[in-house]
Image: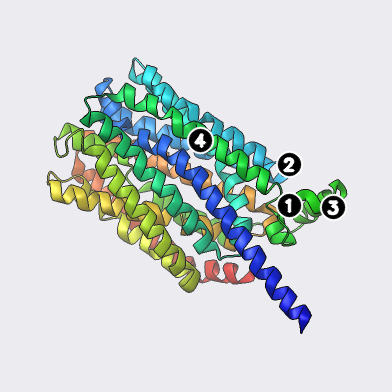
Amino acid sequence: MPSRQNSSVSTNHHRKTAFRFIVIMGVVSLFGDIAYQGARSVTGPYLAVLGASAGVVGLVSGMGELIGYALRLISGYLSDRTRQYWPITIIGYGLLCSIPLLAFAGCWQAAALLIILERMGKGIRSPARDTIISHAAKHVGSGLGFGIHKALDQIGAIIGPLIFSAVYIFNGGYRKGFTILWIPALLCVATLLLARARVPSPEKFETSGETSGETSGETSGETTGHAIRSKGRLPKAFWYYALFSFLSVAGFVNFQIISYHFKIQSVVSDVQIPVFYAIAMGTDGLVALIIGRTYDKTGMKSLIMIPSLTLIIPIFAFSHSYHFAIIGALLWGAVMGIHETIMRAAIADITAIAHRGFAYGIFNTVYGAAFFMGSTVMGLLYDFSISYLILFVVAAEMMALFVFLRFKKDIIQARSAI
């Protein structure tokens, strides 16, 4: 009887420790999002002011995502091979400094380079960071764990755009707004270093329930690492899931093109564009919590919401109605919340711990390739005809729905087998 009580106490302790750690990592992302989401809320209009066309905006945003997500393949592989999750994550967050440097961009080419550098940083850190979080999330539920992280993340994504709106209200400009973003960028790195100090070996959440390196020596760590590397392979269902993700993301219009439309067509004022982005980010965070719990209860079936909601976004976002624009922003934020919560959680649930970092790398590379292709095509289609842009989105999402329904059984069985 005492042994059962001790086991229960130990389980509760690990759950609470894991929860606190997820919250700290959420605060890291909160500060990071103040910096880069604040910038992303205005990069479309900023590039337009610097002389870029809609095609260029689509190409730059798509290229940034492609390079950033392609780096995740390398980063994910290196994370699994070296087990150096923390150093890789810290390097990735360090590249947030490219955001405040946008204040010095004198042409759209220079701004594009800095935008791509920030995306590279996200690409470097994401597989390692997501793997770190996935270990702790196993104690609270994968959907809930990533949902909590995403919700905190989105608080920063709301604050960042509002900083720019406040700057505009007080007669500031883009450069003043970007300069202010030095503060959250530095706080992000400082909080990350604190998280590293508190939990130097996050994989022990999942492998042994321990959270600190203090009770195990180098030999124990090497043995654990060897054991982790020796297990598991990526299941066939992972590749079906990757195809579904590619098609879903290819038809997901990015906010840079949407905000470009708002400015060029005078649908939304410059002051309000960041507010619209903040509204989308708020929706993102709220949906992340709801969909995270839904995913833990219903499983992979909840993924069907992604293409179903995505295909109606451009109908509202590219109208000339202010009220439709609000609906478009809300829908965009909802889909983004689903992307960044259950899409990430699903990877942890259909892959073994041995290759999870690499799986996140592959998934994110697929995501980035789809984003690049979709953004480039939609940017070009916007310059030609918005109607063709909408048709492209509908076609991509209908194919995604077909793939999901065709291979749903395989994906669900893969989750139950892990």
> Residue 212: which numbered mark, if any?
1
Q: Is residue 179 above or below residue 127?
A: above
30 vs 253, left or right, is right
Q: Nearer the viewer, mark 1 or mark 2?
A: 1
Q: Report the amino acid beneath label 3.
A: Ser
384 vs 244, left or right, is left
Residue count near mark 3 (Cα–Cα under 10 Å), binned few <14, some 14–19, many ≥20: few
Front one among 6 and 139 = 6
Q: Nearer the viewer, mark 3 or mark 2?
A: 3
Q: Which residue is mark 3?
A: 220
Q: Which residue is mark 2?
A: 82
Q: Are marks 3 and 2 in contact (CB under 8 Å)?
A: no
One can see residue 315 in this view = no
Furthest residue in direction right, as rendered? 219
Q: Nearer the viewer, mark 1 or mark 3?
A: 1
Furthest residue in direction bottom, as rendered? 1
Q: Secondary structure at mark 3?
A: helix
Q: Report the amino acid beneath label 2.
A: Thr
Give the residue at x 18% y 32%. Answer: 264
Q: Report the amino acid beneath label 1.
A: Ser
Marks 1 and 4, how far apart at CA: 24 Å
Q: Are marks 1 and 2 in contact (CB under 8 Å)?
A: no
- Circle nearer the N terminus (1, 2): 2
- Circle nearer the N terminus (3, 4): 4
Marks 1 and 3, how far apart at CA: 13 Å
Q: Secondary structure at mark 2?
A: helix
